[in-house]
Each structure stands twice: as structure tokens, then as C-alpha cells.
Image (cartoon, coloured by chain):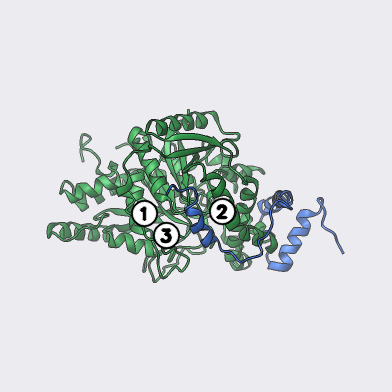
Chain colours: A green, B blue
Amino acid sequence: MSAAEPDLADLSLVDAAEAMRRGEASAVEVLEACLRNIDASEATINATVWIDREAAYTAARAADAALARGAPLGPLHGLPLAHKDMYYQAGRPASCGSLIRKDFVPDYTATVVERMSAAGAYAFAGLNMAEFAQNGTGHNRHYGDCRNPWNPAYITGGSSSGSGAAVAARFTYAALGSDTGGSIRLPAVANGVSGIKPTQTRVSRYGVMPLSFSADNVGPLARTARDCARIMTVIAGHDPRDPTSADISVPNYEAGLDGDLRGLRVGVPTNHFLDDADAPVLAAFEASLKVLAERGATILRLRMPLMDAITAYASVISRVEGGTIHAQWMRERPQDYAVHISARQFGSLAIPGVYYVEALSRRGPLLKAFATEVFGQIDVIASPTIKICLPTLAETDVDRGPPGTETAAMGFSTNVRPFNYLGLPAISIPCGFDPKGLPISLQIAGRPFAEAAVLKVADAYQRETTWHKRRPVAVMA
Amino acid sequence: VKIMTASNFVEHTVETIATWQGVSPPNDVALRLVADLAKTIREFEALRGTLRFEDEPSSFEAALLEAASIGVAL
């Protein structure tokens, strides 16, 4: 590729799919564009755990052959995707970012991966992640820390660190992440991409490494809200193999993106979500509200109820469930965890069952009370996804840092975790940059199963702005 | 009987984990995070009496479905 030629990997997922459908690009060309960016920047970014180039070329050639013979094409036809390395694919590794599962090769495939494959995509790489999806920074002691494409000294966010970094660095068009306490939205912020945590139960978790049975969610990170909408239409919906998945019809989310926010009420919290926010974040957030208003939305400031209870209970559920899953390995192989991971799990073992049941049993009543008070007045909640400007990897390196580093490493999930406890859908999209050139993001949350509204607001915002189109300097073509 | 106090909170909690779970503290960070559990206790203390349990059975999945239509214009 010459310097003057456009980089096909710089297209959004939807634009790349449509370019292939129109015959303007082949699947092999699209794959090779992604591989060129990997070869140029992976040594810096460290977003991948494994890459299967041979299988990728086989899949790309098959996609081109299908197009040539006029076969029916799915909405993701010919797209090379890569996923957090905890999505099981029969015969392929799934390290879960851990030493303990370094050699784990599942013999079955996650429903979401099967659905994306049926829609025409193929997976060609496993992406770096926090060990067992248990930190919000992207540190990984076993596979190396994932580094931010905007500035490698800074965190990528986690736990879907490689998913965010790979999408930002144009290694792939989209990646699945998982979100138990912000693990899709935090890396979406840090890497300047879009990422949606669906409603709890909206997407099947069959074939996905569990962290917290009650709070785990599967969702995509991609360049645009429209990309996320296309993927959500493919992966959402009931799965008989995941009995916890909701049996509710799935709309065509992409078809609902019309940019028109007239009649939509956007709620801006007057408590919790903006408390102690950094000035650049507040400025970018207020500017984003003006964009939504210009699109026709009504902005209403209101107090979010019950936040003390929601915050307290949210912190307990995933810790106890994660501690339960890992208790046996903590007895047998504690040395095989990174320091900050085993430390987190150790403390969780002391949380009383009474606290856990209290948090779980009040989840439904609290959701109904919250929804009645909030969604009686507004349709979506807008907030910064992270209230502070991004910290560096060194500032949040618990394993190597001084006492107190753990507070810095765990302190920026305050705006994302409440929506895991409440089970609400929430998307994070870029809305600016801080003075150091690191991304800032806007979070939009909605009623249960209102992914369509959340995506519509995010898409409307992206029609008026270009933050999501910016490309990290570290990986400029 | 040794009573847990603020001054022996970490020591007592570590003993409890060893007794009930068979796991020893893996590192110093673990001890600091055990100390941080005092914050969790304070948060739960602050909620006592502010919420009540419902007598009837309920499920979170049902609450999600019910909350989906709250405030939606018909």
C-alpha cells in the first residue's frame, strides 16, 4: 500500500461490509489491511494473545468466493474480527488472560461467536485482557500490559483491554468484550471507541468465561454506534443453551438509527455521576449535551435516587461470585495469579453470605424503584463514562506500585458499575480529548431492553461530531 | 472468645478466611484489601433500616421486564 492509498482498516465496520458488498474491496484486501496495522503496531500496543493468519486467509478467500458466485451475504460478510480471549471457539485457545488457563482449548464455541459467523464474519485473533477479566486498567502480568494506542504510557482500561486497543489501532473492525463492572465501557473510553453493555440477559453468555453469574454481560466494541447496532442485531436474543437469556424479540437496531432526537428526554444526574469530575471531562460532557439538544433532545437535570444502596450492593455481588469461582484455584495455585488478582479474590472470601443475599434480593426492588422515579421523567441518562482524565499504567500498577496504588486502580468505575447492578443497557462513545490527548467519553444508559434508544442517541451524537473518527497517532497509517 | 475490633480487624478476618475457606493471604496487597472491607461494612451499616425485604417472592429477571415499560409513552 502506498502512502497515498486509503487504509481499508480505517473504515467503520458497516462501511467495510458495504464496500465488500459493492465489490469495491475484497475480503482478502480487508484482512490484509488489518494485518498490516498489526504488523506495524502490535509490538507497541500488545493487544493480541494469538493470531491465526492461515485460518484468516482461508476464511477471507471463502468470503470472496461466496460474493463472486452470488451467494446470500450476511450483514457481517467477510469481516475479520477478533475477540477478548475468553470467548470459547472449538479447537482454539482461550487463555482468559491467565497463566492458569494458558493451555485451555475448549471443544465448543460460544453462541455469540457462532451467530457472528453465521452473519458472515470470522474470528482471527484472541485479544489481550485483564487476568480472568478482573481489573479495570488493562494490566496483565502474564501476557504483558496492553498499551494505549493514543499514548502507550497510559492505561487501555479493562478488562476488555485488547478489544478496545485493537479496534482503536485498526487491527480489526470490532471486538467482543465482556462487562461485569464496566469492562466494555472503560476500554471504550480509554481507547476512544464505542462500546455497549446490553441489558442483563439480552445476549447469550454460553461459551463465555464466567466472572459473575449475576452481572456478566457480552457486548461489542467498535468504531461507531452504528457498528454496535449491526452487531447487536446479530448477537442479541434468546439462546436455549443459556437459560438466563431473555426470550424477547430483537429489533433491527440499525434500522432505528434516524438521527432524530425530538421528543426524547435526556436526564443529567445532579448527584454521584458528576461529583469530583475533572474539569476537562466536565467541559466535554457539557458540550456533548448541547449536541444532543441541537438534535432535538430535551435536557432535564435530576437527582438519581438510591445511589448509596446501588453503589454498596454493586460492589459486593461480583466480588463474591468471582471469589466463589476462583476459591479452589486460590487454595491450590495462588502463586499463579498476578498479585492484584489474588489480592482481590482473597478479600472477597470474607464477605458474609448475608451481605451477598441482601445485595441480590434487593436488586429487583431497587431497579423498579429507580426506574419509576427516573424513567417516569426521562428516557435516557447521560453522564461521563469515566469522571477523571486517564491515569498512566505506572500510576495504577498495583503489583509494582506503593501502598495505595490499589485505590487509584479501582477508583474510576464509579459511573459504570451502577448500571451493572441495575442491569440497564449503557453505551460509551468518544466525546473529546483531555489536555494530554487521551480520550474522554459520554455514557448513555436507558431502560431495560431499550438498546434501540441508547444506540439511537449515540448515533445521533456521532452524526454531529468526529471524535469517533480520529485515529491514534501511534498507529497512523 | 476473641472479639473482632477495629485494631484486630485484619488479623481476625484473615483467620476467618483460613478457617472457612482454607486460603491464606497471598501477598501484602491482599491484607490491604482486607482492611478496605471495613468500608464495605460501613456502607452496609449506613443502609440498615432504610430498605425492607418484600414478603413475596420476586426475581430480578421479572423486574427487568416490568421496568422496561415504566414511563414509556403509549
Q: CA distance from mark 3 to mark 2?
A: 21 Å
Q: Earlier in the sequence, mark 3 or mark 2?
A: 3
Q: Is residue A162 left or right of residue A343?
A: left
Q: Residue at x 55, y 31 (%)?
A: A278
Q: Residue at x 40, y 31 (%)?
A: A291
* Amino acid type for the residue under numbered disc 1: Met
Residue A232 got which mark? 1
**Residue B6: where, in percent of width, then height?**
81, 51
Where does label 3 land, which residue? A203
Answer whether labels 3 and 1 touch (C-beta < 8 Å): yes
* Amino acid type for the residue under numbered disc 2: Lys
Q: Is residue A404 left or right of residue A182?
A: right
Q: Residue at x 29, y 44 (%)?
A: A12
Chain containing mark 2: A
Residue A106 got which mark? none
Q: Which one is in front in this view, the residue at disc 3 or the one at disc 2?
A: 2
